[in-house]
Amino acid sequence: MKILISGKTGQLAIELQKQLAGLAELIVLGREDLDLSQPEQIRTQVRAHQPGLIINAAAHTAVDLAESEPGLAFAINGAAPGVFAEEAKALGIPLIHYSTDYVFDGQKPAPYTEHDQPNPLSVYGKSKLAGEQAITAVGGQHLILRTSWVYASHGKNFLLSMQRLLTQNTELRVVADQVGAPTWASTVAQSTRALVERWHTGDAAAWGIYHLTARGETSWFGFAQAIAQHLAVQGKACAMLEPIPTSAYPTPALRPLNSRLDCGRLEREWHVTQPDWRAALDECMAGQSF
């Protein structure tokens, strides 16, 4: 089996390459091979490689930057997934695509389920929702996996930024009223492998949208505290952390206060479970050489 993966140098694609190694022949395409803003390039690559499965791990993920370049965000996050879906359907193969908690407005007091109505606040969230809708409109075999607060020991993410800021400052203010589940990219990749294996052995459950995040919840402030605790154990001096409300840290893009996703459907239907966010963070930071 050949698996085509987009987003070669992204934090999720890198972890997917690790987790899927040995399971199939991997065709991993980066920006130098595939410009996702150009639909015909997507069609050309898929038709040239004739994969047995497509995993779209590429996205325009710069949330604040998307506010000033909506056209590019919608081309990559909104239109491209639909093109992948069309090509996958034509080949009679599945498509796995990743989406985000940012498709919701964060006003619900409880974790969001797949049945809740999306209402994105930002261009990024709206473009990701457009991608979901494009795939759903095409139909075919597909999994749309919504995740949240993804980090890794490489790339650009909250973990790496916070490690740098904690060791370079004496005081640090971090938003404390946005709540979600920090999710290690390796966790998402491991779960993706489990899903691929179940499909490949003929044990697939229903296709559609599923939530996939680490268990538990915290705020960005709580996430920062956990990172600081790890650094302190390593003997590194860290900044004093101060919790602040979102209103004290304005950004170009609005963010949901509640980013919690209920992952029960994935567990019930595909029998795929996730670790607690702290356990995953422990494992990630244990393997770092920061």
Image (cartoon, helix red, strand yellow):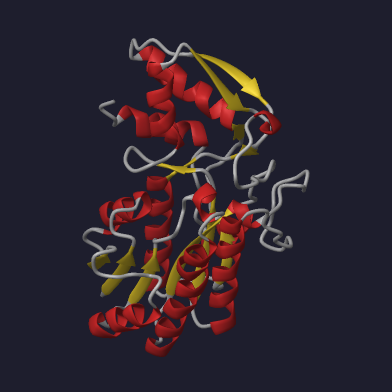
Locate residue 181: give its quadrant.
Answer: top right
Q: Is residue 19 left or right of residue 172?
A: left
Image x and y of residue 236, in percent: 35, 12
Q: Quadrant of the N terminus?
A: bottom left
> Furthest-bottom residue in view?
90
Indicate whether 100 appears above or below 71. above
Q: Is residue 160 left or right of residue 264?
A: left
Q: Is residue 175 left or right of residue 107?
A: left
> Furthest-front residue in view?
68
Task: Residue 201: tell me if it is visible.
Answer: no
Residue at 33 percent across and 37 percent down: it is: 153
Residue at 49 percent across and 31 percent down: it is: 278
Task: Residue 166: tell me if it is visible.
Answer: yes
Q: Quadrant of the C terminus?
A: top left
User: Nearest the camera: 39 or 219?
Assistant: 39
Residue at 40 percent across and 13 percent down: it is: 232
Image x and y of residue 242, in percent: 60, 17
Indicate whether 278 appears above or below 144. above
User: Nearest the camera: 199 or 48?
Assistant: 48
Indicate whether 119 appears above or below 182. below
How many numbered marks, from 0 up?
0
Image x and y of residue 80, in percent: 45, 73
Image x and y of residue 47, in percent: 29, 85
Residue at 43 percent across and 19 percent down: it is: 166
Locate residue 95: give its quadrant.
Answer: bottom left
